[in-house]
């Protein structure tokens, strides 16, 4: 999952399709416009003062949060703003992303360099590079000796490199930069540069005065830039399309539209057989309080205010006496805190103060010891909201050493038979029977029945399993590379006995018990028949990280290079743990001891998660990828190209880097969250991808709503992704799960609370495409009036293993489409699944041949399919 952030080239460039083709097209358009104007002896569209072949531009920042802008000198000597060229990408979104006193120069080779200050607390400044002022490479943040860097300026030297001068609170500093503006070295002595070096131009843009830098550039270049912005505006208008306005989009459309579909079984190609999967991230309380079936909150007494403001070791617990927390002689070095009971009661009401039985018995466990060494007894009971005990048991505690105690709490079925399946609002009470101090820790309550007996909540796990995902990506998301270097997800801390696992703060501002760890993730993949895709940080934390103790935010300069060998070994150890032989590998032996002697058959690993593709990132990223390929050449390495689609700076640089290093990078992970209009108007997005480049994993994507409109747009997009499934290897909607009472992100695929599950229309899209998937694509084409074509889609695939062929159809129009099928025969009893509804609906009904609701059934006859308005259909041919 990606934290929303400003991007060096993201605003306003996040809504376009193919940067290279668009640049060529715009340059061509600009040239044609000017030649046409000359031929007709009229002024060009953009009147520019000065020489015919050149013009004056002014690069400046209107404000610290407004990024870098460009203005041109027009009629009557007035500067006219064109738009934002780039914005600061440093630090946390909201608190940071500021640009102080930017300085820009044009290098001798015609490329551009920019520097600016980021804040007053970090020993860092920003450095950016561009070839054309439109596409900017992801920013680097050189580390210097002093905080409070402001007014950085840059000059090119005779050797091609650059000298950067800075001012800090303590004085002036000097930094030398390489010609490619990627490596920076600060001089050890203070600079004696004259203040005249900091002189900048001052011009008035739209009536306001700003400091900046003036340049002379070819008029063609300016026209190219202006046409770029014009094209963006047109695209953004198109992408704002909403189905609520379909009355305006399609006036007088009528009750039905006739169309044909040509299916050509002679035109086929092999495609990925694992296109549809799921991405699990511990966001929205998806793990603790969600899929992980533990019913108690803060079972380990390890909550702190670092997890969440106001939390502490007793959060989630109540007592009839002040709760005593101790750390003397702890259960584990990774679980230091425990509670002490002395003829008192500890009460836990679970997540959101609700424990629900659903007619299930319970498995209780805890670690305990008698501090004074005497024997004692604890009474364990479950009570309902009226105080009635519905289950009870006793545990005899002996000795001063930690011992694990287990207890099955069986519901009193005779006493509570009348409301057995409705038991709700329960609380667990642990009471010391006799005087004497009893230390208790890792207090756990599970439903007796869990998914496959492996500790997952049955209904949630089954809802995921029903998607029939071909793979599961885990454990994140921004959570895996963490809020700073110290918060990077460490898989080794999540395996082994529960009491020895290390709990950790979640970047989404809550606590991870780590009960759902790497072993459970792999086991869950096995239980639902999906391939595991574990993702490891690429040596840098989340680009949105808060500042560390040195004041450095964002990527925090990455894991220090002298620590990288150790980190890389952790990555290699994970593969060994998953696939190794217990007889020869200590890591594989740990897997065996956990209960899984056979390998997990890991085939792929992700490195990085929508990172800022900076120099710091690339250096560490490549080290990891090379090491994995060197030791495990058959493991597929899935890299990353940032959090936005083409032509964001991370995307452009990420793909460039992946292509340069495709010997070590087999696929890259693309992420984007967009409007329904964007998905509807970008169905050709993958058409021009190089089939010899690394494959694509569309790891996180979703339309902006949780409505039927989004499900339709995503279904149309998936039809075309499937058409390009020889390039796009995998896809996964994100996020997967959301506890309705703990939203960090919206929309999500599945919403739940302690008793209910609500799937979205987008869930139905994912389920249909996964259940009707194949490994061979068969050519199909829908012939319909051009103005309707982008709202209707098809895809035909064959599963060679099952010997079945599937046709998927989407009608996102406000009227019925009567579709004549050419190339095959259909009968009225053809098997199908269909769902649909009004675009604004948050729910939808799944209909199939087995459904008795004939009034809304799909009509098939005489090789004609009548597709209802706003519907998605899967047909088994």
Image (cartoon, grey):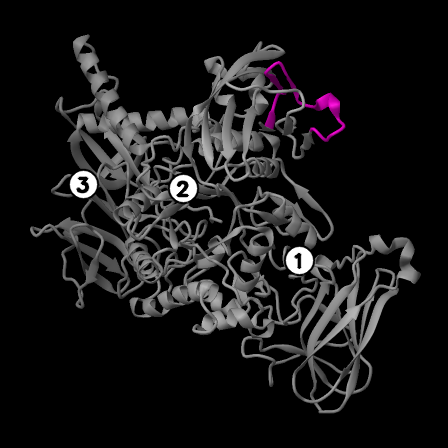
Marks 1 and 2 sit apart, C-alpha to C-alpha, by 38 Å
* Residue drawn at the location 29% of the way across and 25% of the way down: 227
Q: Nearer the viewer, mark 1 or mark 2?
A: 1
Marks 3 and 2 sit apart, C-alpha to C-alpha, by 24 Å
Q: Nearer the viewer, residue 789 or 581?
A: 581
* SS for callout 3: loop
Disc count in the image?
A: 3
Magenta stretch, residue numbers: 849-873
Q: Is residue 557 left or right of residue 855?
A: left
Q: Is residue 724 visible?
A: no
Q: Quadrant of residue 546?
A: bottom left
Sequence-wise, the earlier of marks 1 and 2 is 1
Q: Which mark is residue 670?
A: none
Q: Quadrant of residue 536?
A: bottom left
Q: Which mark is residue 111?
A: 3
**Residue 829 falls within the magenta-colored stretch:** no
Measured as percent of width and height from the top left, residue 679 is found at: 47, 31
* SS for callout 1: loop
Q: Is residue 721 left or right of residue 406?
A: left
Sequence-wise, the earlier of marks 1 and 3 is 3
Measured as percent of width and height from the top left, residue 224 is found at: 25, 27
Measured as percent of width and height from the top left, residue 73 is found at: 22, 28
List the residue tagged with mark 1.
452
* Residue drawn at the location 50% of the way across and 31% of the way down: 797
Q: Is residue 594 left or right of residue 140?
A: right
List the residue tagged with mark 2.
644
* Label 1: how many Cα within 10 Å (few below 14, some 14–19, many 20+): some
* SS for callout 2: loop
């Amino acid at each position: 999952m990606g934290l929303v952030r400003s991007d060096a080239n993201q605003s306003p460039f996040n809504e376009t399709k193919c940067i290279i083709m668009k640049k060529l097209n715009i340059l061509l358009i600009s040239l044609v416009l000017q030649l046409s104007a000359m031929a007709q002896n009229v002024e060009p569209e953009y009147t520019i003062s000065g020489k015919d072949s050149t013009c004056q531009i002014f690069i400046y920042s209107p404000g610290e949060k407004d990024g870098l802008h460009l203005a041109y000198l027009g009629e009557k000597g007035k500067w006219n703003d064109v738009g934002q060229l780039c914005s600061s990408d440093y630090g946390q979104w909201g608190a940071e992303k500021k640009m102080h006193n930017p300085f820009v120069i044009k290098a001798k080779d015609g490329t551009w360099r920019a520097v600016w200050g980021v804040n007053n607390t970090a020993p860092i400044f920003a450095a950016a590079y561009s070839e054309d002022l439109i596409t900017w490479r992801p920013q680097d943040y050189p580390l210097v000796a002093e905080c409070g860097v402001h007014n950085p300026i840059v000059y090119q030297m005779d050797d091609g490199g650059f000298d950067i001068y800075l001012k800090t609170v303590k004085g002036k500093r000097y930094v030398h930069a390489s010609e490619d503006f990627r490596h920076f070295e600060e001089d050890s002595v203070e600079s004696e540069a004259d203040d005249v070096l900091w002189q900048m131009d001052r011009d008035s843009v739209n009536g306001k005065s700003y400091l900046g830098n003036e340049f002379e550039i070819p008029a063609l270049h300016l026209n190219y830039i202006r046409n770029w912005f014009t094209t963006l505006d047109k695209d953004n208008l198109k992408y704002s399309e909403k189905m609520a306005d379909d009355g305006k989009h399609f006036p007088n459309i009528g009750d039905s539209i006739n169309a044909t579909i040509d299916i050509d079984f002679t035109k086929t190609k092999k495609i990925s057989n694992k296109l549809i999967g799921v991405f699990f991230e511990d966001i929205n309380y998806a793990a603790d309080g969600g899929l992980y079936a533990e019913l108690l909150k803060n079972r380990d007494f390890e909550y702190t205010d670092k997890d969440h403001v106001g939390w502490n070791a007793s959060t989630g617990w109540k007592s009839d006496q002040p709760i005593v927390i101790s750390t003397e002689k702890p259960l584990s070095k990774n679980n230091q805190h425990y509670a002490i009971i002395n003829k008192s009661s500890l009460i836990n009401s679970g997540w959101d103060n609700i424990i629900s039985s659903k007619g299930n018995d319970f498995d209780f466990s805890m670690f305990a010891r008698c501090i004074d060494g005497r024997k004692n007894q604890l009474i364990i009971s479950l009570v309902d909201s009226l105080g009635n005990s519905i289950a009870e048991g006793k545990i005899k505690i002996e000795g001063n050493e930690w011992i694990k105690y287990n207890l099955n709490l069986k519901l009193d079925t005779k006493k509570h038979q009348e409301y057995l399946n409705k038991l709700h609002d329960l609380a667990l009470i642990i009471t010391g029977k006799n005087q004497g101090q009893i230390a208790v820790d890792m207090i756990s309550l599970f439903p007796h029945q869990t998914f496959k007996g492996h500790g997952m909540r049955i209904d949630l796990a089954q809802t995921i399993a029903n998607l029939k995902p071909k793979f599961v990506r885990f454990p994140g998301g921004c959570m895996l590379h963490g809020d700073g270097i110290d918060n990077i997800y460490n898989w080794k801390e999540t395996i082994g006995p529960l009491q020895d696992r290390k709990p950790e703060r979640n970047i989404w501002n809550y606590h991870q018990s780590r009960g759902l760890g790497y072993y459970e993730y792999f086991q869950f993949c096995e239980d639902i028949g999906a391939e595991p895709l574990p993702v490891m940080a690429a040596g840098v934390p989340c680009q949105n990280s808060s500042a560390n103790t040195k004041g450095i935010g964002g990527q925090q300069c990455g894991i220090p290079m002298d620590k990288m060998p150790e980190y890389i070994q952790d990555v290699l150890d994970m593969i060994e743990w998953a696939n190794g032989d217990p007889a020869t590998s200590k890591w594989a032996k740990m897997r065996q001891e956990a209960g899984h002697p056979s390998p997990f058959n890991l085939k792929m690993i992700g490195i990085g998660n929508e990172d800022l593709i900076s120099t710091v990132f690339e250096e560490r990223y490549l080290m990891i990828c090379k090491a994995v390929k060197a030791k495990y050449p058959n493991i597929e390495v899935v890299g990353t190209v940032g959090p936005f689609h083409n032509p964001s700076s991370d995307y452009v640089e990420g793909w460039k880097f992946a292509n340069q290093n495709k010997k070590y990078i087999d696929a890259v992970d693309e992420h984007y969250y967009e409007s329904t209009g964007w998905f509807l108007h970008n169905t050709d997005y993958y058409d021009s991808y190089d089939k010899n480049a690394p494959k694509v994993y569309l790891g996180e994507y979703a339309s902006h709503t949780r409505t039927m409109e989004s499900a339709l747009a995503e279904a149309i997009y998936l039809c075309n992704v499937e058409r390009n499934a020889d390039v796009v290897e995998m896809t996964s909607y994100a996020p997967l799960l959301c506890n309705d009472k703990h939203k960090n992100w919206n929309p999500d695929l599945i919403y739940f609370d302690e008793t209910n599950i609500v799937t979205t229309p987008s869930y139905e899209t994912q389920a249909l495409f996964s259940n009707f998937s194949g490994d061979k694509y068969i050519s199909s084409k829908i012939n319909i009036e051009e103005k309707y074509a982008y709202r209707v889609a098809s895809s035909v695939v064959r599963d060679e293993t099952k010997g079945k062929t599937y046709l998927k159809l989407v009608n996102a129009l406000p009227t019925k489409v009567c579709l004549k099928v050419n190339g095959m025969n259909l009968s009225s009893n053809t098997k199908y699944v269909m769902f649909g509804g009004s675009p604004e609906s948050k729910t939808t009904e799944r209909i199939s041949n087995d459904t008795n609701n004939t009034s809304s059934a799909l009509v098939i006859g005489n090789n004609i399919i009548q597709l209802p308005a706003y519907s998605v259909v899967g047909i088994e041919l």
